[in-house]
């Protein structure tokens, strides 16, 4: 099968096939949960400067993102997510591509 990408999907919140316009930040992260319906939790590993201690520390942030059918991101995948308008109470990000599938 390999990397089969669906040509189209009927998801209106899809950034590729629906009317979803992305804007603002584009970030990469790892899918840590794919249990939600068309929602994944993406974890970003960040390096943050802490002026108080004058050093960089690693922090993590988890962001819920919309996962359209044509993307179908799974736990362990490295994905690109883009900021968009609010899709639901907690979602304002949409997965736009899978950079690396889990186990590859
Ligand atoms: Zn789509």
Image (spheres, rainbow, N blue to C red):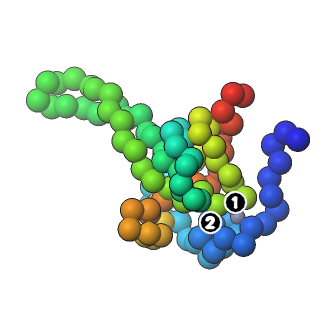
Is residue 81 among what the camera can see? no
36 to the left or right of 4: left
- Residue at (64%, 61%) from the top-left corner? 68
**Compared to 34, does 77 lie above or below?**
above
The verdict on label 1 being within 8 Å of ligand 1 is yes
96 to the left or right of 84: right
Q: CA distance from mark 2 to mark 1?
A: 11 Å
Q: How many marks?
A: 2
Residue identifier under label 1: 69
The verdict on label 2 being within 8 Å of ligand 1 is yes
Q: Position of residue 66 (x, y in %)?
A: 54, 59
Image quadrant containing the N terminus: top right
Q: Are marks 2 and 1 in contact (CB under 8 Å)?
A: no
Which one is in front, 32 or 71?
A: 32
Q: Earlier in the sequence, mark 2 or mark 1?
A: 2
Picture quarter with ligand 1? bottom right
Q: Position of residue 67 (x, y in %)?
A: 60, 57
Query: To which quarter of the image does residue 14 belong?
Result: bottom right
Secondary structure under badge 1? loop
Residue identifier under label 2: 15
- Residue at (45%, 40%) from the top-left corner? 43
Is residue 44 among what the camera can see? yes
Q: Residue furthest left?
A: 52
Which one is in front, 25 or 76?
A: 76
Image quadrant containing the C terminus: top right
């Amino acid at each position: 099968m390999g990397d089969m990408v669906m040509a189209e999907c009927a998801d209106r919140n899809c950034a590729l096939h629906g009317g979803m316009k992305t804007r603002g930040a584009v970030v990469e992260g790892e899918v840590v949960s794919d249990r939600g319906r068309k929602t994944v939790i993406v974890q970003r590993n960040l390096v943050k400067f802490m002026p108080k201690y004058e050093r960089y520390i690693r922090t993590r942030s988890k962001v819920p993102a919309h996962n359209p059918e044509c993307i179908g991101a799974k736990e362990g995948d490295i994905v690109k997510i883009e900021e968009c308008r609010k899709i639901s109470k907690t979602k304002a990000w949409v997965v736009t591509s899978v950079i690396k599938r889990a186990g590859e």
